[in-house]
């Protein structure tokens, strides 16, 4: 899943830099990448924290 | 609409502020690659998540720099860019805070080496907090700090392409580390692509 996220981020930024402009598609890819990273965070956050109140 | 009004000191500061933001995270991302390949410390899943949010935070200044180059920058675009950076920094800080709390118990050695006494995830949290304050300041004074369109120069081009190289390097690095697995292991010790 990390590879999928990095591919999206790489394509998004290379598309912006090579074209020299930012389109709605780039904003959409940013949002998609954000959501996938949050899902990945949730998938990895399986252990409880070693602290208690 | 092309907008190339005469730049002011404030608009130059705004443009160089965006470049400084991008350069700072170029430095941090390069540092992450240094830890990985020179010091052979494999980034854990949370480390990678923080890297992703740093990259997403760079969307804002990159958007502003590219719009300045085209001459289409407006205060609205300026605020939109920094708004996106602010959101990415907020989400990245949540990952950093979890990482700090996972190793906060007494006698916990932490994950990886320390730099000036703090681990890299603590430095990541500090960087996200700095970004949040920076974005807030830039957004508050967007009307004055928004570039006019004539500030673009070769240093910005170099800055942008260094960022592009670091993104591609991180792509190859994660492909090597994750291999054909869906998720990274919690405590990576080797490049799964080659094992």
Image (cartoon, rainbow, N blue to C red):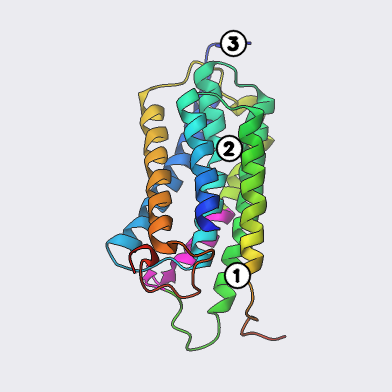
Residue B23's disc is none
Q: Which residues are magenta?
A: B112-129
Q: Which residue is mark 3?
A: B2
The foreground one among B144 and A11 is A11
Locate the C terminus of chain B and report the quarter of the image it occupies. Answer: bottom left
Label 3 SS:
loop
Q: Is residue B89 left or right of residue B122?
A: right
Say whether residue B114 is magenta.
Answer: yes
Q: Which residue is mark 2?
A: B60
Marks 1 and 2 belong to one chain: no
Q: Nearer the viewer, mark 1 or mark 2?
A: 1
Q: CA distance from mark 1 to mark 2?
A: 27 Å
Label 1 neighbourhood size at 10 Å, few (<14), some (14-19), many (20+)? some
Q: Is residue B115 left or right of residue B19?
A: left
Q: Residue at x 55, y 11 (%)?
A: B4
Q: Is residue B148 above or below residue B82?
A: above
Q: Which residue is mark 1?
A: A44
Q: Is residue B94 above or below residue B64?
A: below
Say whether residue B151 is magenta.
Answer: no
Q: CA distance from mark 3 to mark 1?
A: 46 Å
Q: Quadrant of residue B119?
A: bottom left
Q: CA distance from mark 2 to mark 3?
A: 20 Å
Q: Chain of mark 3?
A: B
Across and down, in percent, residue B148 comes to 56, 18
Across and down, in percent, residue B151 comes to 47, 20
């Amino acid at each position: 899943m990390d590879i999928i996220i990095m591919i999206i981020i790489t394509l998004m930024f290379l598309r912006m830099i090579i074209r020299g402009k930012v389109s709605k598609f780039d904003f959409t890819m940013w949002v998609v990448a954000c959501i996938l990273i949050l899902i990945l965070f949730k998938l990895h956050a399986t252990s409880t924290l070693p602290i208690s109140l | 609409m092309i907008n190339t009004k005469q730049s002011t000191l404030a608009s130059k500061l705004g443009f160089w502020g965006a470049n400084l933001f991008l350069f700072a995270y170029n430095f941090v991302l390069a540092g992450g690659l240094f830890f990985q390949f020179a010091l052979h410390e494999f980034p854990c899943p949370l480390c990678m998540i923080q890297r992703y949010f740093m990259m997403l935070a760079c969307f804002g200044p990159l958007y502003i720099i590219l719009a300045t180059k085209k001459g289409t920058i407006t205060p609205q675009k300026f605020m939109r860019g920094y708004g996106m950076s602010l959101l990415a920094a907020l989400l990245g800080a949540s990952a950093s805070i979890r990482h700090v709390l996972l190793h906060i118990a007494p006698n916990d050695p932490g994950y990886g080496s320390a730099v000036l006494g703090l681990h890299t995830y603590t430095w990541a949290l500090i960087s996200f907090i700095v970004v949040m304050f920076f974005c807030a300041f830039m957004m508050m004074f967007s009307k004055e700090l928004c570039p006019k369109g004539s500030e673009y120069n070769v240093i910005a081009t170099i800055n942008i392409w260094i960022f592009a190289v670091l993104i591609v390097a991180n792509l190859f690095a994660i492909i090597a580390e994750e291999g054909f697995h869906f998720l990274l292991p919690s405590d990576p010790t080797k490049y799964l692509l080659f094992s």
